[in-house]
């Protein structure tokens, strides 16, 4: 497994990809778990697998500083080596964002303005700018993302389309603990009482799903039901619940096929997000 830190070396390596075959890329912020590993396994359909680890300072709001994000690079490297990853890209913040860094990729419309974008407006441009830089440096054929970060997926789809970036995208389902909590590096920040309380996030999504399965389609009522589940637990401070179109993030008055049920909440030191998608005809992506 090759570890690359320098941007020049990454560029040079990427220039030689063509000879080696297709390149699958999994961008991460590290502190790896089985959700990341599921993306890496999927990426191994390509001849070369590249994983990046970088805690992107641009996508953290002031109240949730990047410094608080859990890190353990030596452990990550062991996991990646055991998973037969070919290249780990570990760029340095001072190289990616030197003091004179001045170019940002901004999106407009509901993908940028709603949900995460409403809570922290700079989040979307932080994600878009970072992914754009990583795609330039790594030049993958296929990039792999998790459905858990639904808005990141929507941002990347839009970015790739609008800027004509030559990369295919694959989106993999959310991996969960046995009680339904979505795996997240941030779960390690929870105390045991907070971890118990965090079960409610998935339960709130399931409460929305149960209403839809019972025939309810009105989005405000489904949002209210999800909110009520969260409100029953004082340790969980809700940022938002949303029922919206899964690609455009526009609000929808009624749940129709391809509708996202999403939420974000703070529990102790951790800010957690989760979602499920109604695919239509009684089918769900959980
Ligand atoms: P992160 O390191 O949190 O930025 O995540 C890196 C990639 O892993 C993103 O595409 C995430 O959507 C994905 N990911 C994070 N958690 C999960 C999960 N529980 N299941 C599947 N993919 C995940």
Image (cartoon, grey):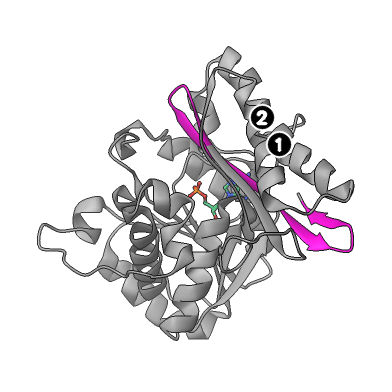
Q: Is mark 2 within 8 Å of ligand 1?
A: no
Mark-to-mark CA distance, 1 and 2: 5 Å
Give residue 167's position: percent from left, percent from top: 52, 79
Q: Can you name the residue that lies furthest to the left here?
A: 100
Are the residues at dot 1 and dot 2 in contact (C-beta closer than 8 Å)? yes
Disc number for residue 228: 2
Q: Is residue 165 above or below residue 157?
A: below
Task: Assign the magenta stretch its main secondary structure.
Answer: strand
Determine the secondary structure under disc 1.
Answer: helix
Q: Residue at x 59, y 72 (%)?
A: 169
In this rendering, position of residue 133 left or right of residue 259 = left
Give residue 117's position: percent from left, percent from top: 41, 54
Give residue 28's position: percent from left, percent from top: 48, 52
Residue range in magenta is 265-285
Q: Residues within 10 Å of mark 1 (few under 14, many from 20)?
A: some
Give residue 181's position: percent from left, percent from top: 67, 34
Q: Is residue 258 visible to us here?
A: yes
In this rendering, position of residue 61 left or right of residue 245 = left
Quarter occupied by residue 225: top right
Q: Residues within 10 Å of mark 2 (few under 14, many from 20)?
A: few
Q: Please state which of residues 219 and 103 is positioned toward the viewer in this rendering.
A: 219
Q: Residue at x 37, y 53 (%)?
A: 123
Disc number for residue 225: 1
Q: Is residue 54 above or below residue 16?
A: above
Q: Please state which of residues 250 and 75 is positioned toward the viewer in this rendering.
A: 250
Determine the secondary structure under disc 2.
Answer: helix
């Amino acid at each position: 497994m090759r570890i690359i830190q320098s941007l020049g070396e990454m560029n040079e390596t990427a220039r030689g990809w063509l000879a080696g075959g297709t390149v699958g890329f999994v961008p991460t912020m590290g502190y790896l778990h089985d959700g990341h590993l599921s993306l890496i396994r999927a990426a191994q359909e390509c001849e070369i697998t590249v994983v990046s680890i970088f805690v992107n300072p641009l996508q953290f709001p002031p109240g949730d500083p990047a410094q608080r994000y859990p890190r353990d690079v030596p452990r990550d490297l062991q996991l990646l080596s055991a998973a037969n990853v070919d290249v780990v890209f570990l760029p340095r913040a001072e190289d990616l964002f030197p003091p004179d860094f001045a170019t940002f990729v901004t999106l407009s419309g509901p993908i940028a303005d709603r949900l995460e974008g409403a809570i922290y407006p700079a989040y979307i441009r932080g994600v878009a700018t970072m992914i754009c830089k990583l795609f330039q440096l790594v030049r993958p054929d296929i990039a792999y993302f998790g459905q858990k970060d639904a808005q990141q997926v929507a941002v990347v789809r839009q970015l790739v389309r609008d800027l004509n970036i030559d990369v295919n995208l694959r989106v993999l389902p959310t991996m969960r603990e046995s009680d339904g909590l979505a795996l997240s590096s941030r779960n390690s920040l929870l105390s045991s009482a907070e971890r118990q309380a965090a079960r409610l996030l998935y339960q709130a999504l399931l409460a929305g799903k149960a209403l839809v399965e019972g025939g309810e389609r009105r989005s405000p009522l489904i949002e209210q039901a999800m909110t009520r589940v969260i409100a029953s637990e004082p340790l969980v401070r809700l940022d938002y619940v949303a029922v919206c179109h899964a690609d455009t993030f526009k609000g929808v008055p009624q749940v129709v096929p391809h509708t996202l049920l999403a939420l974000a909440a703070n529990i102790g030191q951790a800010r957690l997000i989760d979602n499920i998608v109604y695919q239509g005809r009684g089918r769900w992506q959980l």
